[in-house]
Image (cartoon, rainbow, N blue to C red):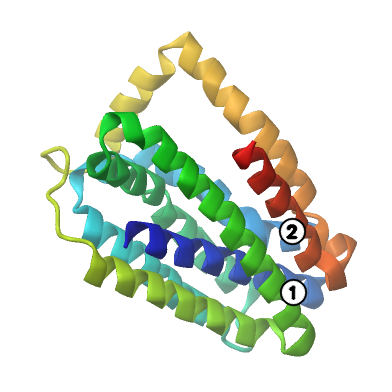
Amino acid sequence: PLFLSSAAHTAAQTLTGLALGTLVYDATDSPLLSALSMFGPSLAQVLGATVLLSGADRLSPRATLTGISATFALGTTVLAAPGLPLWSLFLVILVQGLVAALGGGVRWGLLHELLPDDRYLPGRSVFNMMSGLTQIAGYATGGALLTTLAPRPTLLLGAVLYLVAAAVTRLGLTPRPPRTEGRPTPAETWRTNRVLWSSRPRRLTYLGLWLPNGLVVGCESLFVSYEPGAAGTLFACAALGMLAGDLT
């Protein structure tokens, strides 16, 4: 259930991201705003990780993952509403990014509980490959839908996929207690962040993770404005390259 719900959530993200970027670019003709609409949630996750991330250990995994997918389903439905002001659109994107800040910590913490220590890394790699496959499918499907339908119906389909992810999580996962007692607070988040940042090897590892990914996302953020009609193909090819790298 964790694998299937994660796949549905990732497919929904790729589908809705492409549709939203296209919708904003059609309305504004702005590569910057189009890029922010697609990857703005990632920026908001940075803010969320500085104040909310202690909740990843102090909230029920099943309830949290279900709530994240349900929140994305609701937010995506709002984004599909005709006549939504641009500032309202970016406000919804901000909320989605803040909520998503909890997702990775909860998901990988739960995976670590489900798998023995010697199987966690292979399991995590399988999830990476699943992400590549679902991104390929999501972007290819999104590109096809955008040429035959329009961005708003595609967004609604993404909202349905988010609901599927929420339902699989709620019905398929067994309830588990939080890994740590206590209330999630920004102070606790900052305390843990200070511990993590105090290690030079960890700081260098973070930079090694962030810089290449940041450059890749910088290129991908221009796909819609560079070639709107082929953006889905470009994103799918990038995901195919990621999958090939994971397999290698």
Looking at the image, residue 216 sits to the left or right of residue 55; the answer is: right
Q: Which mark is residue 84?
A: none
1 and 2 marks in contact (CB < 8 Å): yes
Instruction: Name the outermost residue toward the top.
Output: 200
Viewer-proximal residue among 120 and 154? 120
Residue at 47% over, 17% down? 202
Residue 159: x, y in percent? Answer: 49, 78
Which quadrant, please, contains the C terminus? top right
| SS category of the residue bearing label 2 | helix
Mark 1–mark 2 distance (CA, rounded to whole Å) = 9 Å
Residue at 71% over, 70% down? 140
Residue at 59% over, 79% down? 155
Q: Mark 2 is on which residue type?
A: Phe
Which quadrant, please, contains the N terminus? bottom left
| SS category of the residue bearing label 1 | helix
Residue at 76% over, 67% down? 232
Looking at the image, residue 115 sits to the left or right of residue 100; the answer is: left
Residue placed under numbered mark 1 in the picture: 143
Question: Where 239 sits versus 209, above or below?
Answer: below
Whether residue 234 is visible, yes or no, is yes
Whether residue 185 is visible, yes or no, is no
Residue 113: x, y in percent? Answer: 23, 41
Q: Mark 1 is on which residue type?
A: Gly
Q: Quadrant of residue 144?
A: bottom right
Mark 2, Cα crowd under 10 Å, few <14 / some 14-19 / many 20+, is many
Question: Where 171 sits versus 200, above or below?
Answer: below
Total marks shown come to 2
Labels 1 and 2: the sequence-earlier one: 1
Residue placed under numbered mark 2 in the picture: 235
Looking at the image, residue 97 sits to the left or right of residue 69; the answer is: right
